[in-house]
Structure formats: structure tokens, C-alpha cells
Image (cartoon, rainbow, N blue to C red):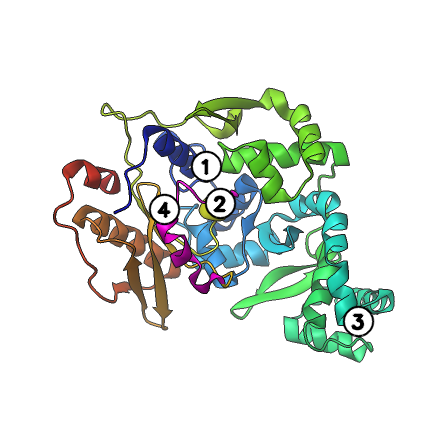
């Protein structure tokens, strides 16, 4: 059976859930901006700075779960109004950001990321002439409000004499995105369209490199703390020297907390963490999170959020695809999958161990919230094993 969290581990997970807006900070929602649904969705992207989003469909819920009361249509409007975009701001991985944040992040990370891909470019036979032709074709064909699906974009590159066979097409898109020319912007069916970044979302605030490094550190800690500088370096792929330079610029805006002998950093304006209950612990409830969620992928170590014995259950076959997660009292307790039709969504639970009845009820409530986000009723496909022998204190957290 999965061991019970130590008090320090419970504190760390609680504060991370709060800083990521999965839980209300201090038990209250008041620190979250108001406004319409699209604005509240955009506020989530601003709070976390970047949310991993390889799977577009799952990434919709990564925003929705952190903006209670919003819907899938609100997320679509946030994209369609240019409030948020999707691109490769770091690690060569798709993330959701605001357009302004994307620009300065690319200013810090893009050169190093592109250099790291150079060998792959050579293996695919991609050279300077290919990038030049692709750049010119994109700038011409998308000018004046143009937008294109991936297939449409590779077709326009082909017409410009650029071979997009195999993986050449996706690498050409990635290269132009790293240069800040294009991004994934408005919705296009069930996916997104490529647009010119500066035309779609004209530049607002600009930062010098030194300012950007400080902003990078501060915003990561604001949306992911408590965390260490090592965590930030892994997440951003910024060098240790650059990270320390950024830290020095914003040190007066950060506080430190020591948990189990490790010093973590957090932004002073991230809100006041909720106090433990009289028993020394405050329940963290149960959450239905998408795959690739920042709660797990925002840090190099998956523990204590994911019990080590079940790490391979989140990424079956180590294929790089992270499954949606069932989280109970801060710990990933299983996975889930969905089947969506025009009239309903059916979810199937795959808990790592039998759930307590209290945890099962709490997860059902969060699935109902997921259904409201989709605008569809949710049906749980099959009964899962219930642990009728669980002690009262084991069940308390999920019922909070």
C-alpha cells in the first residue's frame, strides 16, 4: 500500500496546489482575478507563466481546472481573442502562455534550444535555404490575418519549393515558432491555426535580457512554488549562472521556507498558505487533472506527488505520453480516460489501489465539475474497488 505522507511532504504539496491555483490559496478564491470566462482563463496562463500542452484537448482542462466556473468555450474564446497562445517557449515542448510572455521567454531560451536541435536538422537535410524559404512563405501567405492548419501550412511551404516530407514539416514549424514569427493561435476545428505572432497579438511589454531572467525566476516561483533554483533550471533549461542572475534581481520579492531540511523558494505575493487544521493537517480534497499537468511535470522530481511504485502507470511503456490523473489529498492515486460523444462524456477510472468511499465521492464531484466545463453530463463507466477498511483519518482529506 502507498505510504502516508509525512507532515512536511503534505505541506509541500498543499502549497504547490495553492500556488498552481488547483486549490484556493488560504482556502479562499479572492486572489484570482474576476472578469469574463476568457479573461479568467488567460489569468491562469499568466499565473503559471507556461502550462505544458503537447495534447491540445487535455490542455483545455489544465486551464479550466484552475479557473472554476469556466467552460471549454471560454478557453476557445481566450485563444480566439489572442489572450493566450501555444508555442515552444522552452525545452522544445509546447506550452500555453500569453503572447507577451512568449516573446521574452523566447528571447532567453530560443537560441540555445535551436542549437540543441541542429543535429536533427542536419539529419533531415534542413539547411539555411529551407528556413529562408519557409520564413518568406509564412510571412507572405499569413499576412493580413491569414491562418492555416498544420496541413494547410505544410502545403503552402511545398508550393514555395520547401520539402516537408517526413518530420521536416513539423521541424520547420517549430523553427519559425522559435524565431517568434508564428504561433498556434485561434481555434481551428478541434485544434488550432498557425498565425503570425506579431500580427495576431501585437507586442506590448518588452523586457531586456536581464529583466527577463528575473521575470522568469519570479514567475516560475509565483506559479509553481515552493521550489528550488534547481527545479527552475530543469523546468526552463536556463543555465545555473543565468538562473542565479535572475534570482539576484528578484530576491527581495521571494521568501524561503524549509521543509524536511530542504530550503524552498516562493514568491511573497503568491498568497498566504492555508493553515493546517487542529489535527496538524488540512485536507486537500480530490482533483481530476489532465495528462501532462504542471502539478506533476512542473518539477524534475515526481515525488512525493507520485508514489514511486506507480510511476510507470502514468507513462505506460515509457512512451512519453502522460495520462490524466486522479489526485487525492495531493497524491496521484490513479489515472482516468474519457470517451466523448455529442451528448455525454464517459470516464473510466484506473486507481492504483482501492479508493476509500470518501475519495470516490470526492472524485465524482470533480468529474461533475469537468462535465460542466465540457457542457456535457458525465457518466463513470464502471465501479472501482472501494476500500471499506480505510480508517477515518485516511478518508478525511478527500472529503474536505
> Which residue is at the far top?
252
Tell me whether circle 3 and circle 1 mark residues in contact (CB < 8 Å).
Answer: no
Residue pointed to by mark 2: 40
Residue pointed to by mark 4: 307
Q: Along the polypeptide, which appears first: circle 3 or circle 1?
A: 1
Residue pointed to by mark 1: 32
Q: Along the polypeptide, which appears first: circle 3 or circle 4?
A: 3
Secondary structure of residue under mark 2 = helix
Residue at horizontal 67 percent and vertical 29 percent from the top? 244
Q: Estimate the spatial distance between the alpha carbons at disc 4 and disc 2, rounded to whole Å.
A: 32 Å
Q: Give the range drawn in magenta.
A: 299-318
Q: Estimate the spatial distance between the alpha carbons at disc 3 and disc 4, rounded to whole Å.
A: 43 Å
Q: Is residue 125 left or right of residue 225?
A: right
Q: Position of residue 249 (x, y in %)?
A: 68, 25
Residue 54 seen anywhere in this rendered image of the structure: yes
The front one of 371 and 179 is 179
* Label 3 CA crowd tier, 10 Å (few <14, some 14–19, many 20+): few
Tag in front: 3 or 2: 3
Q: Estimate the spatial distance between the alpha carbons at disc 3 and disc 2, rounded to whole Å.
A: 44 Å
Tag in front: 3 or 1: 3
Residue at horizontal 42 percent and vertical 42 percent from the top? 303
Q: In which quarter of the image is the C terminus?
A: top left
Q: Estimate the spatial distance between the alpha carbons at disc 4 and disc 1, rounded to whole Å.
A: 31 Å
Amino acid at each position: 500500500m502507498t505510504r502516508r505522507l509525512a507532515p512536511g511532504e503534505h505541506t509541500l504539496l498543499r502549497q504547490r496546489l495553492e500556488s498552481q491555483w488547483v486549490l484556493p490559496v488560504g482556502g479562499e478564491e479572492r486572489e484570482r482575478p474576476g472578469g469574463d470566462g476568457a479573461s479568467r482563463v488567460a489569468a491562469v496562463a499568466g499565473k503559471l507563466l507556461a502550462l505544458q500542452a503537447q495534447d491540445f484537448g487535455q490542455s483545455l482542462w489544465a486551464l479550466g481546472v484552475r479557473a472554476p466556473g469556466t467552460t471549454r468555450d471560454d478557453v476557445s474564446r481566450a485563444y480566439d481573442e489572442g489572450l493566450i497562445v501555444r508555442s515552444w517557449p522552452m525545452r522544445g515542448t509546447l506550452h500555453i502562455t500569453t503572447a507577451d510572455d512568449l516573446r521574452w521567454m523566447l528571447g532567453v531560451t530560443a537560441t540555445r534550444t535551436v542549437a540543441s536541435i541542429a543535429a536533427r536538422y542536419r539529419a533531415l537535410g534542413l539547411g539555411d535555404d529551407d528556413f529562408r524559404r519557409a520564413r518568406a512563405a509564412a510571412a507572405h501567405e499569413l499576412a493580413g490575418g491569414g491562418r492555416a492548419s498544420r496541413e494547410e501550412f505544410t502545403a503552402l511551404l511545398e508550393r514555395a519549393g520547401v520539402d516537408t516530407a517526413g518530420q521536416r514539416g513539423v521541424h520547420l514549424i517549430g523553427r519559425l515558432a522559435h524565431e517568434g514569427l508564428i504561433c498556434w493561435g485561434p481555434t481551428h476545428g478541434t485544434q488550432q491555426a498557425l498565425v503570425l505572432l506579431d500580427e495576431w497579438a501585437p507586442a506590448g511589454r518588452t523586457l531586456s535580457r536581464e529583466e527577463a531572467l528575473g521575470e522568469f525566476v519570479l514567475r516560475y516561483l509565483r506559479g509553481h512554488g515552493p521550489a528550488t533554483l534547481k527545479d527552475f533550471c530543469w523546468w526552463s533549461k536556463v543555465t545555473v549562472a543565468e538562473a542565479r542572475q535572475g534570482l539576484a534581481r528578484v530576491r527581495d520579492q521571494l521568501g524561503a521556507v524549509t521543509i524536511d531540511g530542504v530550503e524552498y523558494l516562493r514568491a511573497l505575493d503568491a498568497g498566504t498558505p492555508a493553515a493546517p487544521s487542529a489535527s496538524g493537517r488540512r485536507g486537500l480534497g480530490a482533483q481530476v487533472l489532465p495528462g501532462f499537468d504542471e502539478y506533476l511535470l512542473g518539477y524534475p522530481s515526481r515525488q512525493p506527488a507520485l508514489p514511486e511504485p506507480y510511476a510507470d502507470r502514468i507513462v505506460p511503456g515509457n512512451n512519453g505520453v502522460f495520462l490524466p490523473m486522479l489526485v487525492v489529498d495531493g497524491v496521484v492515486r490513479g489515472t482516468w480516460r474519457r470517451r466523448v460523444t455529442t451528448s455525454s462524456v464517459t470516464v473510466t477510472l484506473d486507481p492504483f489501489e482501492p479508493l476509500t468511499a470518501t475519495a470516490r465521492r470526492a472524485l465524482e464531484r470533480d468529474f461533475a465539475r469537468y462535465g460542466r466545463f465540457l457542457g456535457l453530463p458525465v457518466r463513470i463507466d464502471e465501479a472501482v474497488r472501494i476500500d471499506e477498511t480505510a480508517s477515518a483519518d485516511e478518508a478525511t482529506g478527500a472529503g474536505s
